[in-house]
Image (spheres, rainbow, N blue to C red):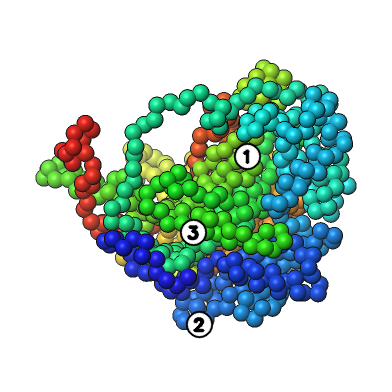
Amino acid sequence: MNDIDQTAYPEAGFAAPPPPAYLQALAPLTAAEIVAVVAVVKADAELGEGALFETIELREPTPEIFRDHIAGKAMERVARVGVSHRDRPGVWKLTVSLAEKRILTKQNFPEARPMVQVEQLMSVERVVKADARFIEACRKRGITDMTGVCVDAWTGGNFGYKEEEGRLISHTFSWLRLRAFENFYAHPIEGLNAVVDIKTGEVLRVDDHPGAPPIPMQELNYDPEFLPAARAPLKPLNVVQPEGVSFTMDGHAIAWDKWTLAIGFNPRDGLILHDIRWDGRPIVRRAALAELVVPYGSPERGHYRQNIFDIGEYGFGKFTNSLRLGCDCLGTIHYLDAHLNALDGSPFTIEKAICIHEEDAGVLWKHWDFRADRTILRRGRKLVISCICTVGNYEYAQYWNFTQAGDIDFEMKATGIVNTNACEPGQPGKYASELAPGLVAPIHQHIFCARLDMAVDGPKNSVVETNTHAEPVSPTNPHGNAFYGEETVLKTELAAARRANLETHRSWKVVNPEKLNHVGRPVAYKLHTPDCVTPFLAEDGPSGVRSSFTRNHLWVTPFQEEERYPAGEFVCNSDGHDSLAELVKQDRPIENTDIVLWHTFGLHHIVRPEDFPVQPSISCGFTLSPAGFFSMNPSNDVPESVNKASTLAGKGDCCG
C-alpha cells in the first residue's frame, strides 16, 4: 500500500512528488479487512451466523481526528457495518475495530429496512416468474414460455399499503426478451406488477391492471449481432504519452501538478474524494455523490410508484463496472480495484473500478497583443478520476476533473436504455413520448445530490450568496447602465436552504473569514451550478416527502458525522423523517465553522426517439472554482508547450 507507484512509468520525465503519507489512512477497506470484520460480527451472540451484510466500509475520521493524524497522531482503522436478518425486522449499525477485532458500537433500528443487494435482484425475478398468478397474467398476454420474461426489481417506496408495512418491498416491472441478447426494453409487459417481500421471497400480490395495451413486438436493437454492417470507421485517434504520466500514485493517494488527494470507495457512495488540496492548501475535505433519485411523471397503472433512489436504495458502489483498457478511458491509464462485501459478507473485487488518467483540456489561456503583434498561449491539461456504474437500465459515468487553473469540475454522463412502457399505437398520452408504434418512454428526471464537506484554507468556513441587481436610473446612474452584485452571508441552516434564480444570476461561494487575500477579502471557492432542476412531485405526496432534498438547489449544514445522506440513512420504504429537509429545521448556525454543502442538480428528460434503443450520453454537473483564493490566475506559470506530434492534414510538418 505504501509503495510509490512510479515503476510502471520508468521513462517518465516530470512527475509530481509523492502525495503526503497521511493520506494512506483514508484508503478503502481491503478484502482482508472485510473478512476480519465479518468474522467479528458473526461471532457476536446477538447478531450470529445469520447476519446479512448490507455495507462494510471504512469509518472515515472526523475533521478533528484527521487534523490530529496530519499532525502525527496515529489513527485507528475502524469499519462501519450495516447488518440485517432474514427472519427479523430492522437494521443494526455497528463500528468494528480492525486492530482490536471487536465491536466498538452497536445500535439497532427496528423500523429501518436495509438496502437492496445485487443478489436479491435476481431472487425477486425468480420468485415472480414462478408465481402462478403472474404466469396466468402472462398467459393472458400471449406469453406461454416464461424463459424470455425479464422482471426488474424496483423498490416500492412507501404508499401506505397495509400488507407492505414493516417489509422490504419490491414493486416489479417486466419486459419480454424475444431471443438471446435481444433488447427486451423494446417489449414492455404493460400493466403487470408484482409486489414482493425481498427478504422472505414472498410474492404478496400481483397487480394486473385492466385495459393495458398489448406488448409492442417490433425489435429495436443496439447489439451489433442484430444490426446491419456498421458505418465506415474513422481513422485512428490515439492518445499517446511517450514519457508516461505526470501523476504519482501511492496506494489510493495521488499527486498531480499542484493537486493532492486520496481516492476512496464504498458500497453506497461509490467513488469518494478526500482531502483535496492545491499546493498544500485545503479546499474540500470530502466530496462524493450522496444520492440520486429518479422520479417518473406517469400516474398510469403501476407507474406512479416509479421514484427510485439509486444510491440510497441500491448503492452506486456495488453496481460499479469493471472498466476496459482502450474503451472506457483512453491514454495511459492507472486503475484502482474496489473491494466490497456480498450479502453473506464474503469479499468480492471489482477489478479496474476506478480510472485515473490525464486529458488535454484545450486552450487554457491566450492573448494576442495586437499592438506588439505578440501572442502568448498556454494549453491546459486535466486530471480525470472516473468510474461508471449500471443500475438497472441506466449507466451513470462520473468524472471528477482537476484543472491547472484550480477548478474542480464534476461531470455526470447518463447513458444506457430509457425505461419503457406500452401504449396503443399513436396514443402515447401526455406523460410519455412515443419511440416506436406502441412503445413509449415516460417523462422523468435524474436528480443528484453532491455532498461537499468544505475546508477552504482551513476548517472555519461560511457561505456567501451573491445576487446581481440593476440599479434604478438616478443622479448616480443617469444612463441606466449600472448593475452590481450584492453579497449576503447565510448564517443559519434555514437561511441557507436556497434555490437558483436566473433573474439575479444567484451564486454561492464558500469563504474563510479568517484568511484574507492580497486585497483584504476572505479567500473563497465559488460553486457554479449550471444544471439545477425544478422538481414536480407534490411535496406532501408519497414520493414527494421522501424526495424532499430536491426542493432546494443548495443546503448547508454544520458537519455532523452521522448526517451523511440527503434522503436519510435508511431509504428503502422510508417516510422521509430523517431527510435533509427535516434536519435543517434545527436551524443550526453555519457561520465560520466546519460546514457541508449539499448541491442538488440533474437532468430533466423528455425522451426523444433518438434516445432509443440506447441513449447517447447526456451530461450535467457543477464546478468549484477559486474566487479570491489566489492573488492572480494560478495557471500563469504553466510552461509553454508545442505539441511536436501535431501535423498538417495530408502533410507531415508540425505547427506549419
Q: Residues within 10 Å of mark 1 (few under 14, many from 20)?
A: some
Q: CA distance from mark 2 to mark 1?
A: 46 Å
- Left or right: 423, with 556 as reference point: right
Q: Earlier in the sequence, mark 3 or mark 2?
A: 2
Residue 37 placement: quadrant: bottom right
Circle 3: element type:
strand
Q: Is residue 393 above or below residue 432?
A: below
Observer-side mark, 1 or 3, equals 3
- Left or right: 475, with 153 as reference point: left
Residue 568 placement: quadrant: bottom right
Q: Could you say which is closer to the camera, residue 486 or residue 64? A: 64
Res. 73 mark: 2
> What residue is shown with label 3?
336
**Residue 542 placement (x, y as % from top left):** 76, 44
Q: Could you say which is closer to the camera, residue 401 or residue 484? A: 401
What amino acid type should be assigned to the residue bearing mark 2? Lys
- Left or right: 242, with 252 as reference point: left
Observer-side mark, 3 or 2, equals 3
Circle 1: element type:
loop
What amino acid type should be assigned to the residue bearing mark 1? Asn
Observer-side mark, 2 or 1, equals 1
Res. 393 mark: 1
What amino acid type should be assigned to the residue bearing mark 3? Leu
Q: Is residue 97 above or below residue 365?
A: below
